[in-house]
Image (spheres, rainbow, N blue to C red):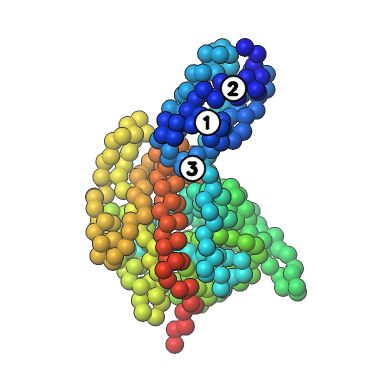
Amino acid sequence: MEFTKQNISNVLKSITHSETGQDIISSGIVEDLEISDNSVNITLIFDKITDPFINSIKRSIKSEIEKQFGLDAIINITTKAKPKQKAAPKNINGIDGIKNIIAIASGKGGVGKSTVTVNLAISLAQKGYRVGIIDADIFGPSIPKMFGVEGVKPSGINEDGKELILPIEKYGIKMLSVGFFVSASDATIWRGPMAGGVLKQLIDQAKWGELDFLLFDMPPGTSDIHLTLVQSVPVTGAIIVSTPQEIAIADARKGVAMFKAKDIDVPLLGLVENMAWFTPAELPENKYYIFGKGGTDKLAKEVNANVLAQIPIVQSVCESGDKGKPVAIDTTSIIGIAFNNLADNFLDAIEKRNNELPPTKQVIIK
């Protein structure tokens, strides 16, 4: 059989999705098909990147093409998820064009809050959402390194007589950080009001355009920065990141209490348990609970919240962050699937919050 696009398409029509019974051509799973010499590039699109039949369909594609066109055929298969319907713009006050403002916080440092922020942003962007990040950890900014944009300087634009900062963009994510404006080797020594002023500049003097989500990577603990945020913009909701051990849970409890305080009253979208267990790359089915087990579930019941995700420890998380390539980019890996699930649960939490609660108001603390 001649190696043509039409003939390959005909072969793919013989492959069906086991759940729907439809072939992958007529059902639209094959989004793109291109050939060059003896190679074929196929893009598959699924409702969810966690579809359990993805690997079996990929194996069937490879087997059928090799059977019909020979073992020397080069087959490249890419998979992705369909974008979900955009979240309802219920909270558009505060920053023009921003639909939802999310605070991602933790009770203590070292629990992987920035890792969660970055990879949640990546997973949301992969689903077709417009996402931005403000690195609000003024004293320890890590977003530039995690995106591989250290040393990059944002440019500016004059609009209606006002100087605006243009966020840096990578992997489809717009971002601003104090790390773009100070040397990575210099210590940031500012009093609380000075740090708060810097955060307000990142909020007020940036040209974000239209965004579905603006994520704030907050500093650990409860500080002036947190108060500056809730006084500056109406925060749609907060996510608290913790690890399973008791000392982290105790501090996470304080973070929850801050957002639920009467004068602040920011809805809690849920908890994320990071470093939930260790999984060796060579033994992907094994789980070792080196930091304990069940702490985040216990806190979730205590504060009447959901655990949005349990993220395992995988060596590639640290390595990818250091190299500026977030792990969620690989949607087929264990960790990529975990962050994709987090994004799905986050979207469900946002929809529920926006349907059931009124828009958050900026906090006025007398």
327 lies left or right of 286: right
Q: Residue at x 35, y 67 (%)?
A: 255
Query: What residue sits right under mark 3 in the picture?
Result: 47
Based on the displayed image, in which of its 4 quarters is residue 175 positioned? bottom right
Q: Residue at x 56, y 70 (%)?
A: 92
Whether residues under marks 2 and 1 lie with C-beta atoms below 8 angstroms apart, the answer is: no
- Identify the disc placed on residue 321: none
Q: Quadrant of the N terminus?
A: top right
Q: Nearer the viewer, residue 141 or 58?
A: 58
Instruction: State the SS at label 3.
Output: loop
Based on the displayed image, in which of its 4 quarters is residue 222 positioned? bottom left
Crowd tier of the residue under label 3, counting other residues whose Cα lies within 10 Å: few below 14, some 14–19, many 20 or above: few
Q: Residue 103 at what x, y percent from top left?
A: 46, 65
Q: CA distance from mark 2 to mark 1?
A: 11 Å
Q: CA distance from mark 1 to mark 3?
A: 13 Å
The disc, 1 or 3, on the residue closer to the chain's N-terminal end is 1
Residue type highlighted by circle 2: Asn
Q: Nearer the viewer, residue 73 or 60?
A: 60
Crowd tier of the residue under label 1, counting other residues whose Cα lies within 10 Å: few below 14, some 14–19, many 20 or above: many
Query: What residue sits right under mark 1 in the picture?
Result: 24
The mark closer to the camera, 3 or 2, is: 2
Residue 60 visible in the current orientation = yes
Query: What residue sits right under mark 2 in the picture?
Result: 10
Q: Quadrant of the C terminus?
A: bottom left
Residue type highlighted by circle 3: Asp
Instruction: State the SS at label 1.
Output: loop
172 lies left or right of 105: right
The disc, 3 or 2, on the residue closer to the chain's N-terminal end is 2
Q: Residue 146 at what x, y percent from top left?
A: 51, 50
Instruction: State the SS at label 2.
Output: helix
Q: Residue 163 at what x, y percent from top left?
A: 71, 70
42 lies left or right of 231: right
